[in-house]
Image (tube, rainbow, N blue to C red):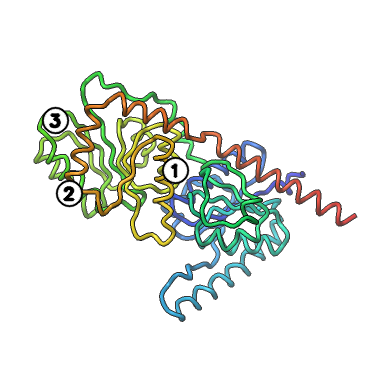
Amino acid sequence: MSSTERLVMLAAGGTGGHLFPAQALSQALLARGCAVELFTDERAQTYGRDFPARKIHIVASASPRGAGIMAKAVAAFALARGTFQARAILAKEKPCAMVGFGGYPSVPPVLAATQLGIATVIHEGNAVVGKANLFLSGRVDALAKGFPTLGGIGPAVAAKTSLTGNPVRAMALEAAKIPYPDFADGRLRLLVTGGSQGARVMTDVVPAAVEALPEEDRKALIVTQQARGEDEARARAAYQRLGVEAEVAAFFPDLPTRIAGAHLVIGRAGASTVSELAVIGRPAILVPLPHALDQDQAANAREFEAAGGGSVIDQSAFSPQWLANALSEARRDLSGLAARAAAAKAAGAPDAADRLAELVLGVAARKGLARESRDR
């Protein structure tokens, strides 16, 4: 391929769960001499400000999940307008491949690429295919999956599916080099995280569970907790009242390093969270986001549990007393925690970005050869 043919376009919704794996792929492609450009939405100003791409394109998009016929019509119009905008950009830039990472902002660019005959790959980070990727799956050349099991697809899509794993941030790969902490000082280091948006249930349950612990167990804890901005003061005050060493913040920019420093993590089960837990190798109690239409977090959590990395509890059963019992059991089974850490790490895919990059460039090469053969 010439340098102009080695442009790869990425398309991702503007949340960390979509942008983090796209960022990891971008770095892998740059290392292979490719140029990278990104399609996303305005939310990327929060999570994608340092995205390694030479250009960032924002085109119209919307979710058709809104209630009512009018809301769905408005969304359909936005997606059609975004597809038209993306076609104009792709026709000018002429990338060798387009890679979608899910979220409705990825639909117009990937759909436009399929219409123009550009090599297309979508990556599904969850263990159940999302609605946007499901819509695109029959049209693209290949689908890369983040977990061994991918629910919600039929045989035709399964035939063009490859297991790459979920690409993780460079920060997570660095954190994976940190050994599992020992227990020489007798303290149990607990990390509580609710995903990129935080989770109120963690502030409702975890401090109350710590209060319910026997005094010996409570004094042995060191807690790092992510709390929503409006819940920070409440969580911080609870730990101060209990005399527990704790750091509370709405957002930890170095979350992978925090994961590496923990003996046990309590968190949601988004694809990025579960994949970073596995690559770094830390045991977890996972509380999937309830009421999700796709139940993707529940499926991700089951994959992590099946690998031996931890346990899954429905939010409806995630009570202070249940968690207090789980923490007491963990402190009395330190070898079991270490074993679950090792099992989690064994299930990780630290080379996922490289595997995905090779898949994308392979699909692009095959599509280019087929086009050349037709043009002869």
* Relative image position of residue 151 (x, y in whole percent): 51, 53
Can I make out residue 29 in this image? yes
Q: Which mark, by number, is residue 233? A: 2
Camera-side residue of 165 and 86 = 165
- Residue at position x 46%, y 49% in the image: 49
Left or right of residue 182, residue 63 in this image: right
- Is residue 9 visible in this depiction of the protein? no
| Kind of residue at badge 2 | Ala
Residue 6 placed where, x, y %? 70, 46
Q: Where is residue 334 in the image (x, y as percent from the top left)?
A: 27, 25
Tag 3 near tag 1, CB within 8 Å = no
Q: Which mark is residue 219?
A: 3
Name the element at disc 2: helix
**Earlier residue among tags 3 and 1:** 3
The answer to which quarter of the image holds residue 25 is top right
- Which part of the image, by quadrant, shows the N terminus? top right
Establish if 121 lies above or below 172. below
Q: Do the residues labelled 2 and 3 touch (CB within 8 Å)?
A: no
Nearest the camera: 122 or 87?
Answer: 122
Q: Nearer the viewer, mark 3 or mark 1?
A: 1
The residue lying furthest to the top in this view is 184
Could you give the CA–CA distance between mark 2 and mark 3, rounded to whole angstroms?
A: 21 Å
> Which disc is residue 303 wearing?
1
Which-is-in-front pick, marks 2 and 1?
Answer: 1
The residue under label 1 is which amino acid type? Glu
For the residue marked with disc 3, what is the amino acid? Lys
- Classify residue 142 as left or right of residue 201: right
Residue occupying the point 35% across, 50% down: 288
Q: How far apart are marks 2 and 1 (CA)?
A: 35 Å
Residue 247 placement, left or right of 110: left
